[in-house]
Amino acid sequence: MFTPQPNDMWIRPISLKLDPPSLKDNTADVDRLVKALRRELGTPKVLAAFTLAAELPKRLRDAHYQVDALVYEDQDVWTVFAAVPRSESPADVYGLALDLGSSTLVLRLVDLATGRIAAERSFNNPQIEIGPDILTRIHYAGQKQGLTRLQRLVVDRLNREIAAAAAENGVSPERLAGLSVAGNTVMTHLFLGLDPYWICREPYIPVINTLPITTAGSLGINIHPAAPVYIFPNVGSYFGGDLIAGILASGMTERDETAFLVDVGTNAEVVVGNRDWLMACAGAAGPALEGGVASMGMMAAPGVIDKVVIDPETRETRIHTIGELPPIGICGSGLIDLAAQLFLAGMIDLRGKFVREACGDRLIELDGIRHLTVVEPEASGTGKPLYLSQPDIDALIRSKAAMYTILTTIGNTVGIPLHAVERFYVAGTFGSYIDPRSAITIGMIPDLPLETYVSLGNTSLEGATRALLSAGARRESHAVRDRITYLELNVNQEFMNLFSAAKFIPHTDRSLFPSVGGA
Amino acid sequence: MFTPQPNDMWIRPISLKLDPPSLKDNTADVDRLVKALRRELGTPKVLAAFTLAAELPKRLRDAHYQVDALVYEDQDVWTVFAAVPRSESPADVYGLALDLGSSTLVLRLVDLATGRIAAERSFNNPQIEIGPDILTRIHYAGQKQGLTRLQRLVVDRLNREIAAAAAENGVSPERLAGLSVAGNTVMTHLFLGLDPYWICREPYIPVINTLPITTAGSLGINIHPAAPVYIFPNVGSYFGGDLIAGILASGMTERDETAFLVDVGTNAEVVVGNRDWLMACAGAAGPALEGGVASMGMMAAPGVIDKVVIDPETRETRIHTIGELPPIGICGSGLIDLAAQLFLAGMIDLRGKFVREACGDRLIELDGIRHLTVVEPEASGTGKPLYLSQPDIDALIRSKAAMYTILTTIGNTVGIPLHAVERFYVAGTFGSYIDPRSAITIGMIPDLPLETYVSLGNTSLEGATRALLSAGARRESHAVRDRITYLELNVNQEFMNLFSAAKFIPHTDRSLFPSVGGA
């Protein structure tokens, strides 16, 4: 848990006991509040949000001039936007952090004074009903009312979740004093109602990278309408605020040690750096790593296979499912496990092709394509067998090869060979399910001591939380953005050579993977 | 005409030729614009208004990346809020200055680059239909929907006038880049939809004195919706932004010379000061000085008597009317002229009572009250005689006595006897119609050489214009506000003694008015 420091909070409640007005001191209500805040904050740059004025006279009189003023800072100017009846200290004022994923949104309700996470809610991005992939949504945004509909879908759903989280924790919406959002560039555009049209067209120009603080009301977010909304800046069309948030959460820019940070997904996003420098690149890894294309591939959910162990002698396959329910499919981490175990048991070869002798009866042909029966119908949650096809493995190998090639390329560029990497952060919820041992076995990530790998979980959400609670973290997110050197991946001959070499399990150059046994 | 200095303009068009995006430079559209403005403005503190983002991509591409960016400064932070196709220099971008009077609004359309006044429109405050006086409007504001209605009335009318002024000058609304407003405290509150309830109740607390810059859109003003609206700060319930604007327009705070500034109206508002200090007070003078209570009293309009000359020998009365039409009433300045001429002709005595012998047949009694026929029915524009009643003169004398007493009191407080005043500014449209010679004759203002008096016309409008065009003037308006010492007028025995002495024409102490002849 990140503990906010009072002087570092850019959204703050400030408890005030104002002198009531008198004939000797007939300062106007708003001016009285602002004057007291100038004293408390030690700066003349304090303004009142215009929307506060109308309600303030009654608020002050009802509360006998003892209120918690809610303020936020932007560009060294503090804005007071609310005055709520003074509470016992510490004031119970909350903020929200949002991981704005293209598949899943995760929302945190955070006590601003203590950093305590009061609630966390995860839910599907309702834009999935328009299209599961980003390109479909970009296309839809260009249609009449499309952009508005995409924005409304996500904002409406978010409002429902906010209301539920607030109600469950007995928090009134007017005490929700800020929102921090980390998403990729396209998700950020759609959230703001900005057309991502030019993002996917050469030369790939977002509408905006560095977003001004805006108010919840102007975005239709049902917290205090004048509360600030902070949105992480993007580096470019293919490197978004979610990754900046990830860098922030990793703390890699605070240390001398050079670390790798990788976010595994449809895009493989890699950052390398330390206190002094940062280099990033992103490349298409394909959806295979997320289990998105395999015949039995599914997103992580109850009944989905997430771990596989195959006895190399008997080739008996033991599976584990989320919630330990009968299996209905496999997620990306399960697929990586399965491929690694198949390789170690000699059931696929170094090109990833099924080995008939080792697979035995479990290998069948359907429409001329080889399939391995992973789960028999009687053990399956669907009543049907679960298969892994040859094309599923082929796709996985292309994806893992792309990932390894991207890592090699950025390592070469910064002059750090992969075997010398001291710290390797794995970002993202999906990444946290991957067993590094299996990922090494299939040659997706370098063969480093397992303790080198640190899974950080949902770094986008964690970074958003920090930026909500800390002015320093918010500033750092901009400093990170401005400091990153973005490496454009040139898919040239050298890249293709590396890629071809990585399309083996674990690699054509076995010396790179000394710890991996098998065929 | 006030000529803006390019570096002093806080609302500015900035002509930009941006480099079009490329694969080598895929900076986002908004960031590209902001980056260029940071360079032009020489500060990193440049933000984009969130509302600009949605429209910018098309704007930039349509204009081939050559645009006039409209920016404004607040708290040392520049906000870019519009990008319009680049025009020939100087860019034709306009602002509006508004004198928000309780009776009359005056609107100016001003070329921001040159300060040229392209149009000026004067129109009644439509809130008059709710009540001509401020107290009625305050009361109405407390009723259901009353406040909203009062605000809508004035905003709707203002929008109609803005649209007409813009259309007549071929200016598109999106090139109206700012509004500056000077009004008294209550008018300012009603304009903003703030309830003035506590302004007229002890201890007389406005909702707000120092107003943040807000946007036109949030107030429903139909100029560029993200354009800034500057509203003059108030000193308190009875000393409003219109007077701050007046001080600004007079330039008295730029000089060593100590000057008096007086705004004549229902309230007599007086400011004394120079570069180093400022003292102000306001007191009720009654509506008589504006002609508001006399039986034939009217606001200045065609057919209204504005000047009167009476031959002291023949007592023949010659009148002048606005537009030289048959007379239908008399305005305040005409009333002051009339009273002075009646006194000099011996038709009223030093107590302001009609002198029967001098008035002759023209003095009649109606309902037991003496009336002087000023215009015979056959000369009148109404077909009826125009009368001046004894109570009309009595009211005028109380008002002029209040004015003189207030002047004496503040003069005594600052240690400047009235006969030593070097410069005496008369502010306000109404004030500019007053003949100082007549006002001296009735003892309303001190008997100073006529060249001491300088009529400044509509200082509220002029101040608003300067604050629109000049960051320095805008800053100065706040400095003035913070520097003013407000003198609370104690209606004590001393004040009443001074008042009683001033209730004669010109005064009980004739030595104070050596230039005045007559009885």
Image (spheres, coloured by chain):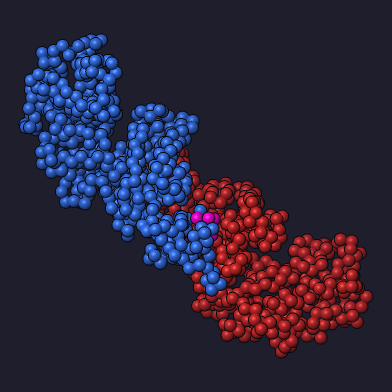
Chain colours: A red, B blue
Image height check: is B117 above or below A425?
A: above
Which residue is depicted at the point 54% across and 70% down? Answer: B22
Report whether B238 appears left or right of B163.
left
Q: From where the camera sits, is residue B351 visible? A: no
Write down the quadrant of residue B333 in the picture. top left
B55 part of magenta stretch? yes
Q: Nearer the viewer, residue B249 or A334?
A: B249
Q: Position of residue A401 (x, y in %)?
A: 71, 79
B70 part of magenta stretch? no
Q: From where the camera sits, is residue B223 visible? A: yes
Image height check: is A345 above or below B469?
A: below
Main SS of the magenta segment? helix
Image height check: is B5 above or below A500?
A: above
- The C terminus of chain B sits in image quarter: top left
Report whether B324 appears left or right of B354.
right
Write down the quadrant of residue B298 in the picture. top left
The magenta-colored residue range is: B52-57
